[in-house]
Image (cartoon, rainbow, N blue to C red):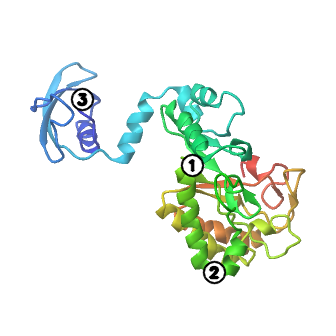
């Protein structure tokens, strides 16, 4: 019943040996018998010699988030640890069973997971996915606004789709960007969605660019300000965010239909493309999504998503 907290673990290390705790001077009947601030005497056996060592006095402290995670990891199998490393597209059939079987860490939903469903059906389906998981999953969607909306494009779920960043800014500036981000976070959380694959951090000022309509549509400095505002708002609302598409999409072609080679110099990435990503990271972004572009100045052979460089 006695949890090994950081303070107790430190005492264990100071003893200079790996040890097995035997008892405390407190009689433990349930988990509420010990409280933060209680002093506890612990007697232990030296694991190498088998001899009983001296008592160590420690003070109970509240278990930290890191301690909780480490304790959880110790109880996980190799298969479970591997499964937690994957954020996968939601299986089309037997989704709940498949996600459970492989202990998947994250599940990405697309339009097919929402089409023709009521709000209640979406909530119930996602709840079923989570119900069978030992460790709660990340449930994600691409709800950027504008051209890319997986949920709000269906009137059964929202009366109108979320607008693009450019449309929002033209209508109400950065204040409306923030308000929209708040509303979007609340909307997604109603269904059990906890990660939005946004914001788009790519810098584009030309309507000719493939990525233009999905971007903020302004220079690197302004895009960085936009990204910072969105990420800070998402963090405040408890919605996970994804910065994309690192290291910056530029004016490259659509990689959904072919290979794109980015021949721009590294100095351009330093002075432009990296700035929005740096702003998002500084604001506390949870994750970064990497593009499939072959960025020649960094790796002449492999796309960024597969490159070790």
Local crowd size for mark 2, using a 10 Å CA cut-off: few (<14), some (14–19), many (≥20): few
Local crowd size for mark 1, using a 10 Å CA cut-off: few (<14), some (14–19), many (≥20): many
- Sequence-wise, the earlier of marks 2 and 3 is 3
Q: Nearer the viewer, mark 1 or mark 3?
A: 1
Q: Which of the 4 image quarters holds residue 240?
A: bottom right
Residue position marked by numbered label 1 in the rendering: 193
The alpha-carbon separation of the residues under discs 1 and 3 comes to 34 Å
The relative height of residue 167 versus residue 26 in the rendered view (above or below) is below
- Please identify the quadrant where the N terminus is shown: top left
Q: Evaluate if marks 1 and 3 touch, with contact meaning CB atoms under 8 Å apart.
A: no
Residue position marked by numbered label 3 in the rendering: 1
- Sequence-wise, the earlier of marks 1 and 2 is 2
Element carrying mark 1: loop
Outermost residue, top direction? 50
| Apparent side of residue 75 relative to residue 52 in the rendered image (left or right) | right
The residue depicted at 62 percent of the width and 69 percent of the height is: 227
Give the camera-side residue of 305 and 188. 188
| Apparent side of residue 38 relative to residue 298 in the rendered image (left or right) | left
Q: Which of the 4 image quarters holds residue 72?
A: top left
| Apparent side of residue 147 relative to residue 228 in the rendered image (left or right) | right
Residue position marked by numbered label 2 in the rendering: 172
Could you say where residue 94 lies in the image, as x and y percent from the top left? 66, 27
Q: Nearer the viewer, mark 2 or mark 3?
A: 2
Residue 286 is labelled as: none
Element carrying mark 3: loop
The relative height of residue 77 versus residue 297 in the rendered view (above or below) is above
Element carrying mark 2: helix
Q: Evaluate if marks 2 and 3 touch, with contact meaning CB atoms under 8 Å apart.
A: no
Residue 105 visible = no
Could you say where residue 280 lies in the image, as x and y percent from the top left? 59, 66
Q: Which of the 4 image quarters holds residue 78?
A: top right
Q: Evaluate if marks 1 and 2 touch, with contact meaning CB atoms under 8 Å apart.
A: no
């Amino acid at each position: 019943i006695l949890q090994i907290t950081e303070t107790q673990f430190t005492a264990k290390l100071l003893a200079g040996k790996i040890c097995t705790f035997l008892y405390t001077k407190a009689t433990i009947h349930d988990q509420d018998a010990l409280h933060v601030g209680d002093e506890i005497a612990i007697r232990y056996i030296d694991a190498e010699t088998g001899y009983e060592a001296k008592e160590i006095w420690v003070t109970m402290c509240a278990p930290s988030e890191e301690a909780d995670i480490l304790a959880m990891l110790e109880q996980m199998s190799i298969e479970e640890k591997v499964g937690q490393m994957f954020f996968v597209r939601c299986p089309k059939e037997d989704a709940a069973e498949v996600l459970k079987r492989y202990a998947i860490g994250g599940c990405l939903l697309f339009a097919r997971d929402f089409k023709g469903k009521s709000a209640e059906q979406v909530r119930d389906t996602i709840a079923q996915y989570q119900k069978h998981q030992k460790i709660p999953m990340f449930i994600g969607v691409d709800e950027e606004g504008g051209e890319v909306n997986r949920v709000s494009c269906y009137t059964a779920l929202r009366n109108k789709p979320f607008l693009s960043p450019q449309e929002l800014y033209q209508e109400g500036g950065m204040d409306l960007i923030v308000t929209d981000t708040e509303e979007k976070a609340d909307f997604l959380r109603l269904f059990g969605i906890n990660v939005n694959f946004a914001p788009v951090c790519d810098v584009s000022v030309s309507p000719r660019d493939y990525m233009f309509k999905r971007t903020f549509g302004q220079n690197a400095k302004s895009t960085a300000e936009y990204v910072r505002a969105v990420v800070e708002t998402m963090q405040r609302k408890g919605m996970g965010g994804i910065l994309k598409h690192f290291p910056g999409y530029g004016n490259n072609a659509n990689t959904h239909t072919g290979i794109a080679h980015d021949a721009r110099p590294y100095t351009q990435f330093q002075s432009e493309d990296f700035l929005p990503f740096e702003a998002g990271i500084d604001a506390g972004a949870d994750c970064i999504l990497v593009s499939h572009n072959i960025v020649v100045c960094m790796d002449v052979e492999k796309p960024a998503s597969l490159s070790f460089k």
